[in-house]
Image (cartoon, grey):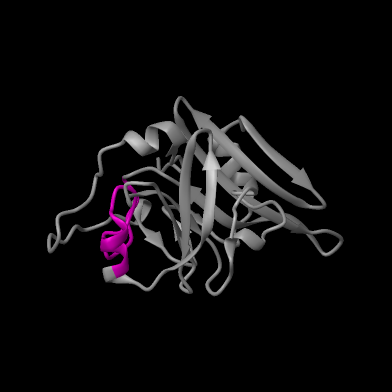
């Protein structure tokens, strides 16, 4: 059985986590259910897909927010968290479509071995990024970096990636009606 479950760590643990980065020059074959495709998917969860099967498989969410046909759905699993952002085109298509996916689980990687635990320097070697701003979670502060390809990176004070957001290419993930980081300061 293929699982949709993936997770991200709490803010305090993300700052203390040792990186799970891949050594430079060491290629790693990433299986389809662990592959991050910018602008498209994280593992088996794809942008544009109906959120109902994901929600059913992952079980009752532990939190979230909803308004005007938009929703952020969050699952906590101990210190881990998974989040998706959905929108409905009410009156036309009442299906809640996934428009953003957030993960901080180190097991998910791009085909260039970019994922949680990798340094900002390593990310910048693989793709151009632009800093959007910073946000706080508890006592911790993180910077959010975005690419035109449809992937954004949450970077801690140690310049390590602690989370990834996949969103449509060419979009700003903070422009969602219910953004993952509503307290982002640009």
The residue under the point 31% across, 45% down is: 107
Q: Quadrant of residue 112?
A: bottom left
Q: Of 166 and 146, which appears nearest the observer?
A: 146
Does residue 35 appear to the left or right of 68 in the view shown?
left
Residue at the limit of the structure toward the top, as seen here: 78
- Quadrant location, the N terminus: top left
Quadrant in the picture for residue 87: bottom right
- Does the magenta portion include 123? yes
In the depicted structure, whether residue 173 falls above or below residue 182: below
Residue 128: % across, % down: 37, 73
- What residue sits 23% from the left and 50% below the top? 21
Q: Looking at the picture, does residue 43 appear above or below residue 105?
A: below
The residue shown at (41%, 44%) is 104
User: What number of labels is visible?
Assistant: 0
Q: Residue at x 54, y 62 (%)?
A: 167
| Depth order, front residue of 21/98 | 21
- Pick whichever, 100 or 97, lies toward us: 100
Q: Is residue 127 above or below residue 94?
A: below
Task: Give percent across and percent down for residue 65.
Answer: 71, 41
Stretch of the chain drawn in magenta? 107-124
Q: Is residue 62 magenta?
A: no
User: Whole-percent x and y of residue 148?
Assistant: 48, 74
Looking at the picture, does residue 128 appear above or below residue 110? below
Quadrant hosting residue 110: bottom left
Q: Quadrant of the C terminus?
A: bottom right
Q: Is residue 3 left or right of residue 31?
A: right
């Amino acid at each position: 059985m293929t699982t949709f479950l993936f997770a991200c760590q709490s803010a305090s643990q993300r700052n203390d986590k040792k990186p799970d980065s891949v050594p430079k020059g060491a290629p790693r074959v990433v299986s389809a259910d662990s592959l991050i495709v910018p602008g498209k998917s994280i593992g088996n969860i794809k942008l544009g897909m109906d959120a109902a099967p994901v929600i059913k498989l992952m079980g009752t969410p532990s939190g979230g927010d909803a308004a005007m046909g938009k929703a952020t759905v969050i699952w906590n699993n101990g210190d881990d968290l998974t989040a998706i952002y959905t929108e409905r085109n009410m009156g036309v298509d009442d299906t809640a479509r996934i428009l953003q996916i957030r993960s901080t689980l180190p097991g998910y990687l791009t085909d260039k071995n970019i994922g949680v635990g990798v340094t900002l320097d390593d990310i910048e070697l693989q793709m151009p990024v632009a800093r959007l701003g910073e946000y706080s979670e508890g006592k911790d502060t993180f910077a959010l970096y975005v690419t035109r390809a449809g992937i954004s990176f949450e970077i801690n004070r140690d310049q390590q990636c602690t989370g990834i957001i996949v969103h449509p290419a060419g979009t700003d993930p903070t422009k969602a009606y219910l953004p993952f980081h509503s307290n982002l300061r640009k």
